[in-house]
Amino acid sequence: MKFWNFATIKNEKDNTESVELRIEGEIVSNDDAWIYEWFEIEHTAPNVFKDELSKYKGKDIIVWIDSYGGDVFAAAGIYNALKEHKGKVTVKIDGKAMSAASVIAMAGDEVLMSPVAIMMIHNPLTIASGDMREMRKTAEILDAVKETIVNAYVNKTGLSGDKISSMMDDETWMSANVAVKNGFADGVLYEDKQIEVSNIKDFAYNRFAIVNSTNEAIKKLFAIEKKQIDNNKNLEKEKLLIELDLI
């Protein structure tokens, strides 16, 4: 059982054929794929993917992506397979290409996003336990993994490694037009004319900005609540003073 498929599409205008495939669900390692198959959970694993991709050597490939991401090493395997493919690779993002799925998207000779799609990049994550030495070692490994991911983004976008690293630190979410502006995508699907984005920072957003905004809203709410409590206390105080005067 697999949750992606290849379909051959014939272009009647020039009588050429291309192959369309979809990458949906979580990107998982070859070792973990059986678990997802057992529970019938959408997923994509590199080995089976590469085996089937090899059947279409020389053909143009259209890769539709709609995935939250997953295992970065599995994504690297799929990325490499697409980069090695003999034929044009066009990536189309119709919903989301987040985390490891955005790395796969970078393999496209051309990357197109739906106007309602999202791309997200962030630092690699893991779960670790142990003493201080093991934790430091884990951090070093994450640094190395981040460098490999930065390489994929730099090769596609032409942005500096420092700029990409900063965007990953911020967990940057990009709409289609912002992704194009930054070089992560080459165009927007279904649009004859690209919408101008004058200031990337106004449109690219990250989790921390949202959290900070939420915190500010909560602070204001508490301030209003405190003011109301203080007003009530003052009213109670005035009422008590009036009662004492009457006594």
Image: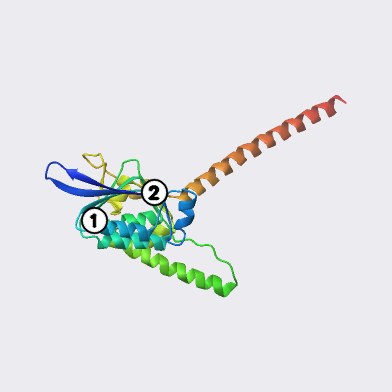
Give x and y (percent) for residue 161.
34, 64
The residue tagged with tag 1: helix, strand or loop?
A: helix
Residue 3, numbered label: 2
Q: Residues within 10 Å of mark 2 (few under 14, many from 20)?
A: some
Residue located beneath label 1 in the image: 56
Q: How many marks?
A: 2
> Which image quarter: residue 109?
bottom left
Query: Is 235 left, or right, of 20 in this rendering?
Result: right
Q: Is residue 76 above or below residue 136?
A: above
Tell me: residue 86, above or below residue 22.
below
Q: Amino acid at mark 2?
A: Phe
The answer, for residue 170, to whether it is visible in the render is yes
Going 30% across and 56% down the picture, which residue do you hit? 52
What amino acid type should be assigned to the residue bearing mark 1? Tyr
* Outermost left residue: 14
Q: Nearer the viewer, residue 215 or 113?
A: 113
* Number of residues whose C-alpha sits closer than 10 Å to that of mark 1, classed few (under 14), some (14–19) or many (20 or more): some
Q: Which mark is residue 204?
A: none
List x then y, in percent, for residue 55: 25, 57
Element type at mark 2? loop
Seen from the viewer's position, the closer of residues 207 and 197 is: 207
Relative side of 140 to 101, left or right: right
